[in-house]
Amino acid sequence: MDSSSVSINGTSTSLFDETTISWSGTLTLVSLFGIGPLIYLGLYIIKVMKQRNNNDDNDGNKNKGKEDQGVELDAVGVKEKIKEGEKGEKEEKGEEAEKKKLDSGEDKDNIIAEAIIIEDNIMKEDNIIKEDDNGSEGENWTSTQYLFSLIGYAIGIGNVWRFCYVIAQDGGSASLFAYIISTIFVATPLFMYEMLLGQFLRLHAANAWVYIKPRWQGLAISQFVMLLIVQSYFVMIIGYTVPYMIGSCADPLPWTIHPEGSSGYWFQNILGLEEPSSSTDAIDGIDDVAGGGDVSTLVEVTDLELQWNLVGSLLFVWIIIFFSVSFGKKMLADITYVTVCAPVILMIILIVRTALLPGAIDGISFYIGKFEASKLAEPQVWANALSQCLFSLSPGFGTAITLSSTTKKDEDVYKAAIITSVANTVFAVASGFAVFSMVGNIAYTTGQDVADVASTGGQGLAFIVVASAMPTFGGAANSVSAIFFFMLFTLGLDSSFCWQETLTSSVEDFIPRLTNKKPPATWIISLLTCLTCFLIGLPYATTKGNVILDGVDFFVGSIFLLLVCFVESIVLNFDIGWKHIEYALQKATSGKRSLSPIYKCCRLDFHILVPVSTFGLFLCQMYYAIESPYLPDNLNIVTLGWVLLALCFVLLFIGVQDFNKYGSLVPIPDDFPHDGTVEERVEYWSNFDENNNNGNKKKVITVDKDKKGETGDPSSSDILAHSNKDVIVDDNDSVELEA
């Protein structure tokens, strides 16, 4: 059936036959889509003008430089001769010292040479290529670009619909309290640890896990497959907004004149469900909200047919993603500025406008005005809150590692993690005010209870409940509709950009390891990954696509993601260690930043809260999935979900044959001030030339085989447990024998 038509008593009628062009909606939508290109064009013009001015200045100084060239060359020649003489003297002294050392009978076992050999063998075996020390062809994020990318990644569509539904169904303010606690003690720490790991190792996620220990190559592969699946259906969710943005250009809005209201428009025109019989039963209580009265029950079709409107939407979104991520981080950063700022501005507009609607105060009171303390005693409330904050910040996908691997070495990722987490939470809470103001207005208009209207969760909250509230804006209905669905569109794009960047980087890491060849150009890999995800996403653009999406999301994007987060916490605890995380943070900030002020709190979430909560929630989800099928009316889709979950689970064990192989993490010194004062930390790190201008100073440490494991890094303690030796650690994390 054509998506623009409906069937009434066997007669097909086009919705657009009853509509005209809304110039307010059209101009609003065109303006919104034109903001990005205009800003990018302006930035490009400014950049060209600056380059032209710099070139003029360089040309002016060129002649002056030529005059001094002869004198400079003579000076350079003299300096080179002096350096050669000094080098010869140092070599002679070094030979004499080495001879004395051998004559004295000292231990000749060079444990550091052994460590370097092991690391080199691992790097060669796994074909890990680090280009320009960051694995991304030398292109790094600036501090602003890095922060905007993280915020855009964290703030997504789920902040608008899923967050509000979770808060509403679990006791309002009580659920919000559980969400904030879970965010502080579980989601944010795990997110921060990933960021620190990526910045410290300067490797993308796929290579980082293998670098830590070869046995975790299964984690890298399964994480990649999980992200490939999630990205494929997530882009389809973004695509759902496209027909609504187009519909915002019609007057009246097409879902307002559908015989079954916004619910019928969503299930029949967008998703492709038919309407075989009449019934007074509404779908999940939604039709009473949208249309009222006796309605036709929409049922699932039996055949799989492509919905060409969704195929077009899917292709449209993938084209945008490809051109945004395929031509360098500079272009992606410029686009991210728009896709992050635009939703914030649009959300402020929506909050102000919806607050003026009749009944808005009732919806807001339902949202935050009630605090059912008894709800905090229910495990399911905490499980829902934890799952929401995990899925919102999205640790476990490896994206935070990949983004952080190309930021500056001295970037304060601790600060960036806190800002990202706070921005994510504030935006989610703010969106609740806009959404529940509209929910309160619907309840006021239809005479229903706010709780009944708010019971619609997930996609239905945005595409049914909120869509049905648009006519309440009167003459501004089309403009507000365009603003709202464009906001959802841009919110989804930010997350998909970062995920696509992670997929492309992972493929670039896999190719040399599997083929011993250099990967092709980034845009070629990006084209292949985008095309692959588009093809994988086509089943979600069928008549049963939304049900397939729901099932795959539950088994892969929910259950397996929790397992991956748990496995990450195991890697952090046993193969990286707490002190290594603290070392990475202090190294980036020259000792000025530390987890020590909240040391006990951080140790609690690092060792207990993160692994226990993620694994506990994983077991709960598995129990519910086994106890009662998630989609009892679609057992074939449930079977597909179990197969995909089993596939990802099996991939975790790919590296088990390398279980006892050494990792490549270098040791950290025993005298490292992990719990020292600011003065002690700054003094310690002043010995390293990367963080100051004091020259190439190096810190001497002593590794004692009787203190195995005290560095907090089992990998390094395994390597260094063979001998006592003085080690010199420089700013590039390399180790060498003390001369």
Image (spheres, rainbow, N blue to C red):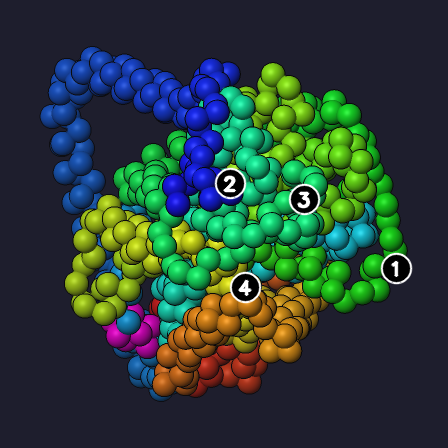
Would you name the residue on which mark 1 appears?
Answer: 374
Mark 2: secondary structure = strand
- Mark 1 neighbour class, 10 Å CA radius: few under 14, some 14 to 19, many 20 or more: few
Indicate which disc, 1 or 2, sits on the residue closer to the N terminus. 2
Say if mark 4 contacts mark 1, CB within 8 Å: no
Mark 3: secondary structure = loop
Would you name the residue on which mark 4 appears?
Answer: 554
Would you name the residue on which mark 2 appears?
Answer: 8
User: Where's the C terminus, which quadrant?
Assistant: bottom left
- Mark 4 neighbour class, 10 Å CA radius: few under 14, some 14 to 19, many 20 or more: many
At which x and y percent is residue 405? 41, 52
Which numbered tag is attached to residue 624?
A: none
Separation of disc 4 and disc 1 at Cα? 28 Å
Amino acid tagged 4:
Phe
- Mark 2 neighbour class, 10 Å CA radius: few under 14, some 14 to 19, many 20 or more: few
Q: Nearer the viewer, residue 76 or 155?
A: 155
Residue 119 lies in the magenta stretch: yes
Indicate which disc, 2 or 3, sits on the residue closer to the N terminus. 2
Say if mark 4 contacts mark 2, CB within 8 Å: no
* Region rendered in magenta: 118-125
Would you name the residue on which mark 3 appears?
Answer: 294
Please name the residue shown 40% across and 60% down the image.
303
Q: Quadrant of residue 656?
A: bottom left
Q: Nearer the viewer, residue 739 or 497?
A: 497
- Mark 3 neighbour class, 10 Å CA radius: few under 14, some 14 to 19, many 20 or more: some
Amino acid tagged 1:
Ser
Indicate which disc, 4 or 2, sits on the residue closer to the N terminus. 2
Separation of disc 2 and disc 3 at Cα? 14 Å
Please say if 302 is above or below 409: below
Say if mark 3 contacts mark 1, CB within 8 Å: no
